[in-house]
Image: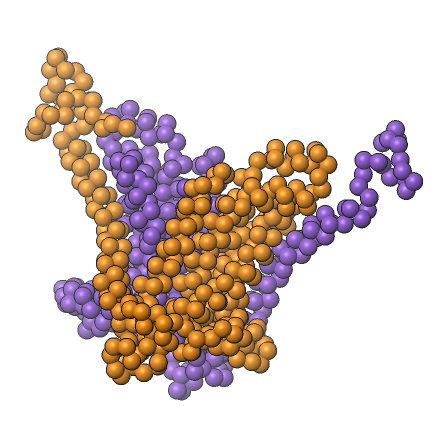
Amino acid sequence: MSAPTTGPIGAPGPAGRGQATGGDRLARFAPSAARRRRDRFARASILAGTVIALVPLALIVYYLLSKGLSSWSVSFFTTDPTGSTFFGGSSIGGIKSAILGTIEIVALASAIAVPLGVGVAIWLVEYGRSGWFAQLVRFFVDVLTGVPSIVFGLFVYIVLVVGTGSTYAGYKGSIALSLLMLPIVIRSAEVVLLLVPGALRESALALGVPRWRVIFSVVLPTALPGMLTGVLLAVARAAGETAPLLFTAAATLKTNFNLGGFMNSLPVQIYKDVTSATTSVEHRAWGAALTLVVMILLLNLVARLIARRSRLA
Amino acid sequence: MASVPTADGGRSLLERPPLARLPDRALKYGLTVLSALILALIVYFFVRLIGQARPAFAKEGVFGFIFGNDWNVGAEHFGALPLLVGTLITSALALLIGVPVAVAAAVYATELCPPRLRGALTMLVELLAAVPSVVYGLWGIFFLAPKLEGAEQWLADRLSFVPFIGGGHATIPNYFITGLVLAIMILPIVSAIAREVMATVPADHKEAALGLGATRWEMIRLAVLPYCRSGIVGGAMLGLGRAIGETIAVTILIGDAPRLGHHLVEQGYSLAAVIANEFGEAQGVHRSALFAAGLVLFVLTLLVNGVARYLVVRAARSGGQRGRGVENAAAGGQILADAAIGA
């Protein structure tokens, strides 16, 4: 699209309507100086708004890199936090248990949320379609999307901590995160499954293939890359969540491979360091934050690459 | 189908034997049950939450709990008004700051930006959604809040004649800084939905405006913005839902003072922050009061998101064939607004 001016734009000063001579009649249709000024002002404001939107990103990236990189070292990744907050430097320990804890908790959460979410999405697309029950399920999935993450933490606490009379454990944190991931996986998988051409299903069915085999050998393989994108975005979101883990997986200092015990995680470790009364652990918080953001960005990057290679969409 | 030869069981040769039909049925009913479980889960969740919140409601009364202006753990008084007000002030501030910026970014990306830059610009705004809440809290409290403290105090002094907005003694964690960081956090979702809705404006409308001699800004104001109004409002409401439910960044930035702040630059509390901050040590009625706060938060986000979805879906309907993208963006809500899928 080009600028909508029809007359000579070069004419300076209050040119415009009424002043046009017979030579260039079109000039009287050119916007008046006041309108042009308002246009320039509005466009400048919109550009300024866009720049303002990008400023926080630049600041966050800059501070994460400048503060985070300086606390990165080999021992930062290979030692557990010591719990001591009174001495600076290496005596406060690293974030090994937090990294491993995040990976374990999120892996289990994905193992729960992905099969369930894909199952519900298949049902919505292949069986439920636009019936009243499918609409109801869609509505409830949307409700689930809007629930604040801390409320998921409360729910898992009520059912699995109060309900069983036991205490915090890593797998309970996984379940809280999987509730959070579920609506994202369902809605993104549904979108991709809807994109699988109907002709593909119909030709398989016409060959006499039973419906379940059509789903497993035709529909799912076609939709796989697209669904993977949605899954990775859900994983990236779950990995950054703190609130659901606070009173489900709790926090601990030691590296723990048993999902039945207390488990540390990166977001909870950062939260503890930020809210700690002493400031010497601030350093570790920046390093851990940079680690977490790099992990999440990698997941996002892979998701985007897969989305680009997908034949659907 | 009388003409089809039948096997001994009396069924058509073209039909599958009953045993072969079994996996089909199993899959269908299995998946139906799975979907029904999602419904059951949410209903069960709601009932259990009410059950846990009941002692607090019984002690203070539902009305007394929500509108009581006294959150005193020591004296076992639980009136959630300071929390509710903190949540509403910070979320409103987030909308006030975040929505104009988000809409400006969306307008720029869809209407004014050179096509080569469009993809990069969209991606950069969406990167904001990839930053975890706790990192926003970390950045806000250690970088942004100390840097802005002086400016806040200056503004508060200048505006001291305005009740609430001006006056007071600025602290590092306060309502204003919380609202500002929340504005950054809702920016990507509001912007993504605004962009999706703007993409549904028919080119005819825009060309007609330009053809009548409108300047670019007049075209945006007369053809684009009115067409997208309900979609943008819906996107803003989705952002509001996020801001209300946001926990960790708010807990770090709002100061966690259990009283009603009298000035914008003073400390406060929010519904989500009180749960994150106090749940670990809470016992008895206190714990029940925190569940009740969770229930109020849950109902509040349900209402806001319900209205938001209605508006966005309505905007999508009027948007014709591109509408599905908008509906999906709405459904995506907290994902990167399905950006990667739409890409």
Colour seen for chain A: orange
Residue at 41% of width from left, 50% of height from top? A302
Q: Quadrant of the N terminus of chain A?
A: top left
- Considering every residue shown, the one lying at the far front of the view is A74
Visible residue check, residue B261: no
Instruction: State the image quarter where residue B66 is shown.
Output: bottom left
Residue at 18%, 40% (x, y): give it.
A41
List x then y, in percent, for residue B90.
32, 64
Residue B97 in picture, x, y percent from top left:
28, 55
Q: Colour of chain B?
A: purple
Number of marks in picture: 0
Q: Residue furthest top?
A: A22
In-front residue for pair A293/A6: A293
In the displayed structure, does residue B257 sit left or right of residue A233?
Answer: left
* Residue at 42%, 78% in the rendered image: A254
Q: Residue at x 32, y 83 (%)?
A: A84
Question: In this rendering, would A182 be left or right of B205?
Answer: right
